[in-house]
Amino acid sequence: MSSTIGVQNIAHTNGTVAATVASDGATTFTTDPFNSVIETFYYHTTDIAEGNNAVLDQTWYRKTNHGAANKNVGMSATSGVWTFPSTGIWQTTLIFNYYRSNAHLATGVTLNYTSDDSANTDTVIRMYNNFYAGSANSSITMPYTFNITDTSNQKFFYTVVGDNVTVRGGTDHSTTLLQFIKLCPSV
C-alpha cells in the first residue's frame, strides 16, 4: 500500500517557513530566520605604526582568500567604530598581531563599547603582553559576545595600548584579523 503526501512546510519556532517538502520528497530550504552572519576582516593592506590609545581605524577588508567564511555580508566600520547590521547575539574574535621594537613594556589592545552611539564609552576588556626583548612579534586573541538590541546605538572599537606598536596588516599569515558570527536572536 502506498500513500502520497502533499506539500508540507516545516516551520521554525518563530513561525517562519524553514523548509518545504514536496510530494515527491524533494526538500527546499529557505533562508535562516536569524539572518545569520559570518564575516572575517583583515586590518589594512600593510603593517601600520600606531601610538598609545590609537583606534584601529585603518580600513578593514573582507577576507576572501584561504577559504574564509563570509555569509550575509553586513558588518561595517567608520573610523574604526563597528556597527552591527542586525540585532542578535554576536560573537566577535580579534586576533591582534603586532610588532614592538622596545623591550620591557606592556603592550596590548582594548575593546571599547558604547550603548549611546559613542556619547559615552566603556572599556570592556584590556589584554596585554609584556616584551622582555626588543624587536619582537606578539599576538593577542580577544573573544567577546555582545547582546545587540539597538543597531543604531550599540557599537564598539579597539584601541592600542603602548607606544611604538606596529599592527600587522595585509593578507598574509601574520595579519590582524577580526571575525563576526551571529549566533541567535537577542535575549
Image (cartoon, rainbow, N blue to C red):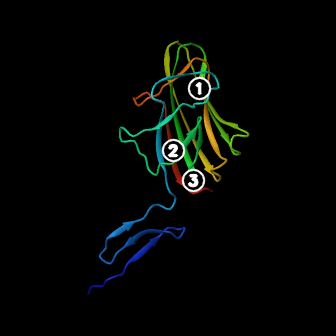
Q: Nearer the viewer, mark 2 or mark 3?
A: 3
Identify the residue position indicated by label 3 in the image: 86
Numbered disc 1: secondary structure: strand
Q: Position of residue 3 (x, y in %)?
A: 30, 85
Query: Which mark, residue 108?
Result: 1
As drawn, 130 above or below 40: above
Question: At 53% from the left edge and 36% from the top edge, which residue is drawn?
Answer: 94
Identify the residue position indicated by label 2 in the image: 180
Which circle's residue, 2 or 3, is located before the other in the chain? 3
User: Is there CB contact under 8 Å for labels 1 and 2?
Assistant: no
Q: Position of residue 104 (x, y in %)?
A: 59, 14
As drawn, 87 above or below 3: above
Q: Nearer the viewer, mark 3 or mark 1?
A: 3
Which circle's residue, 3 or 1, is located before the other in the chain? 3
Choose between 133 and 82: the one closer to the eye: 82
Which circle's residue, 1 or 2, is located before the other in the chain? 1
Question: Which residue is farthest bottom?
Answer: 1
Q: Position of residue 144 (x, y in %)?
A: 58, 41
Question: Which residue is farthest left?
Answer: 1
Question: At 54% from the left edge and 30% from the top edge, which residue is drawn?
Answer: 58
Which quarter shows the N terminus? bottom left
Numbered disc 2: secondary structure: strand
Type of residue at label 2? Phe
For the residue carrying disc 2, how many other residues have a C-alpha within 10 Å: few (<14), some (14-19), or many (20+)? many
